[in-house]
Image (cartoon, helix red, strand yellow):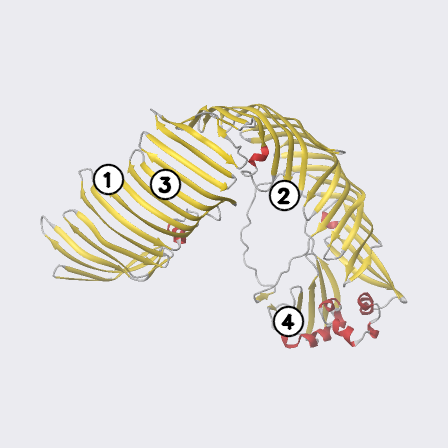
């Protein structure tokens, strides 16, 4: 920074303000007069183009003066890439208490991107949108009056938590040390709150320190409107809120309305409902009486009469829908952190649906009895013809946490479904006993009928070049996020499951359709993995391999009582061709199965694959058929495919992956994804007579990966790998 003083003129150049938010570069010129009784100054401050608080500041200027104990900003303009702000005003004469006797500030802002607020206030949720605002602040250090107006577009606060397409507002309020008073008018249109859309929100507040009036109207759509009007009157140590209007209006003409004047008293840490009752013209009622202690004791009674649960679907989460009539009376006493509940809850004619999974259950009845810390399920059942589900038992809680559980679940021919994944009907007898941290689930399940659909694999492509040095020290992984143990982790199990038949497994991508049957036992101890024993067999079905359909001759999956990945898999399929019988077998552990191809009479692997694809030996393939072997299916043909693939790829083998292996003499490999499922790599060895080999990988789906190597007589071959997660 350089400063020069000449004839009461001070010039500063190269000024820098360094902070964690960035660097601000500035210059200044000041003309001043100084004496024993008087000081006055006039000048300007220029901010040069800088990066500060995540904002690019263009050339900005402030003109100011100080005279007669008054500091005046004649003009201030701030130009940034996010918008422009200008203001002017003055602050003068400090009183005996050090407070300003006279203050005036006017501003105008035109901001096209409010994202910079997150940088200025890191604890603030992300803010987006544009804002035009102007206003004035005037008064003294004891009392200030703020008048302002604003208009915002595409305003978003949080990650899609609150959004408004158009927003307007005006306020004229007095800001004092006791209570803000005045008038506020707000208007929001095109609103989205946590994924739920509303047409508009209008709100106004007016009044003084003794009495405030309010009005709110929220329009969800032309058929549904929420509205409230009232006033808050200051009493000695509380505010009495008189609600003249609290209602929902529906297109049918019905809706919830306050049954007379509603009176709620607000005091420090306590909300008292002297009179609070809502009703509809179809005899539905909700009433609340008593006091809710946010810090102290609570003594509250909640009643509902014939309340239709379907009316709350618009307010509930979109993942489920409810129906039924709710009748309840609940007395809540004690501190909110550990309340006692007494009363009952009943639901008649209930229905529950899950739109995302396709599950829908009707004719539900429920009665819960609340007594102190215990909830007894007197009955919870769902009956439709010959299908039913019945749940009984009790739950005890302490400090708003479940302590003990004793539940019994029985079902017969009951449907379960998850859209696009499975549908089933089952009989069951299950018991859940213990505590929330250590419970035991026992019983039996019989799957009467089911269909399981395995989704297709997603396409994964490599978009960037990777350089991998085998054997090199890997980067330190990010620290693992530790989660609290879930319900299943804290649960022990001993369940017998029977699958007598009529259960089908479908996998479109592999063309698999097979019926399964068997019996298994599932055991689990606290915070340990599942242990499964038993056997599942397939009696008939079909699958596709190399584009051809094959019938399953036999298949079994034997769980040995250890890790589920150690289950023994044995699936075989045979197909007769002229003069030869070809067999495909998948055997071994479920986590690492092996594919073998055999034939009667015995022949080499190349001929077997040729029969599977074209129904004849490789020696009788036409030129067109040999050419097709160099396309997508050829990656499973090993040595037969190698030379044809190299000729077909030619100069297209521009590397996307480079591997460097310095171990045992060293190798270098370059590879490319020819399609999103097919990967080809050439690998060179520095210390081998057979200098290179061709490696081809083809991803059939998320689990199966076919791998062939050729060009090196010691490592040539064909393998199939199955990645299994459980």
218 or 712: which is nearer to us? 218
Callout in the foreground (1, 3) = 3
Q: What residue did someone put label 3 on?
A: 185
> What residue is rendered at 34% in x and 54% in y?
110
Alpha-carbon neighbours of circle 2 within 10 Å: few (<14), some, or many (≥20)?
Answer: some
> What residue is rendered at 83% in x and 74% in y?
619
Residue 194 visible, this orientation: no
Q: Secondary structure at mark 3?
A: strand
Question: What is the C-alpha distance between the residues marked 1 and 3?
Answer: 26 Å
Q: Secondary structure at mark 2?
A: loop
Q: What residue did someone put label 2 on?
A: 355
Residue 627 position, x and y percent, is 75, 74
Instruction: Tell me if residue 328 comes above or below residue 668 in the rendering.
Output: above
Question: What is the C-alpha distance between the residues marked 3 and 4?
Answer: 79 Å
Q: Secondary structure at mark 4?
A: loop
Residue 665 is marked as 4
251 or 524: which is nearer to us? 251
Callout in the foreground (4, 1) = 1
Counting residues from the start of the chain, the first of labels 3 and 4 encountered is 3
Question: What is the C-alpha distance between the residues marked 2 and 3?
Answer: 39 Å
Alpha-carbon neighbours of circle 1 within 10 Å: few (<14), some, or many (≥20)?
Answer: some
Counting residues from the start of the chain, the first of labels 2 and 3 encountered is 3
């Amino acid at each position: 920074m350089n400063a020069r003083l000449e004839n009461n003129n001070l010039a500063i150049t190269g000024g820098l303000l360094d902070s964690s938010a960035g660097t601000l570069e500035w210059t200044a010129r000041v003309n001043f007069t100084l004496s024993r009784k008087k000081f006055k100054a006039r000048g300007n401050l220029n901010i040069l183009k800088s990066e500060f608080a995540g904002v690019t500041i263009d050339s900005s200027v402030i003109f100011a003066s100080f005279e007669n104990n008054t500091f005046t900003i004649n003009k201030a303009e701030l130009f940034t890439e996010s918008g422009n702000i200008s203001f002017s005003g003055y602050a003068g004469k400090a009183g005996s208490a050090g407070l300003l006797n006279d203050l005036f500030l006017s501003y105008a802002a035109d901001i096209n991107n409010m994202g910079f607020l997150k940088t200025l206030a890191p604890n603030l949720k992300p803010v987006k949108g544009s804002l035009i605002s102007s206003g004035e602040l005037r008064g003294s250090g004891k009392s200030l009056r703020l008048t302002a107006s604003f208009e915002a577009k595409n305003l978003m606060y949080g990650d899609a938590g609150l959004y408004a397409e158009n927003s307007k507002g005006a306020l004229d309020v007095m800001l004092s040390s006791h209570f803000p008073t005045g008038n506020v008018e707000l208007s929001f249109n095109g609103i989205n709150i946590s994924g739920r859309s509303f047409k508009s929100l209008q709100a106004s507040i007016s009044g003084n320190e003794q009495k405030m009036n309010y009005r709110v109207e929220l329009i969800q759509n032309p058929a549904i409107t929420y509205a409230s009007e009232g006033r808050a009157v200051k009493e000695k140590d509380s505010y009495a809120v008189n609600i003249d209007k609290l209602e929902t209006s529906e297109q049918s003409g019905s809706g919830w309305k306050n049954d007379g004047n509603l009176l709620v008293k607000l005091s420090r840490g306590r909300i008292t409902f002297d009179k609070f009752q809502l009703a509809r013209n179809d005899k539905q009622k909700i009433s609340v009486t008593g006091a809710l202690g946010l810090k102290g004791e609570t003594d509250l009674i909640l009643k509902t009469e014939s309340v239709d649960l379907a009316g709350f679907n618009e307010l509930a989460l979109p993942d489920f829908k409810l129906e039924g009539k709710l009748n309840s009376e609940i007395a809540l006493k004690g501190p909110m952190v550990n309340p006692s509940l007494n009363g009952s809850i009943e639901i008649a004619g209930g229905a529950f649906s899950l739109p995302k999974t396709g599950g829908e259950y009707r004719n539900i009845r429920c009665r819960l009895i609340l007594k102190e810390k215990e909830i007894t399920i007197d009955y919870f059942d769902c009956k439709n013809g010959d299908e039913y589900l019945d749940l009984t038992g009790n739950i005890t809680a302490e400090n708003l946490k479940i302590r003990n559980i004793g539940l019994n679940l029985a079902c017969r021919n009951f449907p379960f479904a998850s859209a696009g994944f499975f549908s089933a009907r089952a009989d069951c007898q299950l018991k859940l006993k213990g505590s929330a941290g250590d419970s035991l689930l026992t019983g039996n399940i019989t799957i009467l009928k089911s269909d399981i659909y395995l989704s297709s694999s997603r396409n994964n492509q490599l978009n960037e070049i990777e350089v991998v040095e085998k054997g090199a020290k890997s980067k330190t992984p990010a620290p693992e996020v530790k989660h609290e143990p879930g319900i299943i982790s804290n649960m022990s199990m001993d369940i017998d499951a029977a699958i007598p038949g009529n259960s089908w497994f479908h996998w479109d991508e592999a063309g698999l359709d097979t019926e399964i049957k068997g019996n298994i036992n599932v055991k689990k101890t606290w915070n340990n993995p599942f242990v499964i024993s038993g056997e599942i067999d397939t009696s008939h079905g079909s699958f596709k391999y190399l584009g051809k359909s094959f019938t399953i001759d036999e298949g079994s999956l034997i769980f040995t009582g250890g890790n589920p990945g150690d289950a023994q898999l044995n699936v075989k399929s045979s197909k007769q061709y002229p003069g030869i019988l070809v067999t495909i077998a998948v055997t071994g552990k479920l986590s690492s199965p092996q594919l073998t191809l055999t034939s009667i009479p015995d022949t080499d692997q190349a001929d077997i694959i040729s029969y599977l694809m074209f129904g004849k030996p490789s020696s009788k393939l036409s030129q067109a058929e040999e050419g097709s072997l160099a396309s997508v299916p050829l990656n499973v043909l090993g040595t037969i495919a190698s030379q044809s693939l190299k000729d077909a790829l030619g100069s297209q083998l521009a590397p996307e992956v480079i591997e460097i292996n310095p171990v045992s003499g060293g190798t270098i490999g370059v590879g490319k994804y020819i399609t999103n499922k097919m990967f080809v790599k050439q690998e060179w060895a520095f210390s081998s007579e057979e200098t290179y080999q061709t490696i081809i990988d083809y991803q059939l789906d998320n689990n199966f990966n076919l791998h062939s190597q050729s060009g090196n007589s010691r490592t040539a071959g064909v393998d199939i790998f199955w990645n299994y997660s459980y």
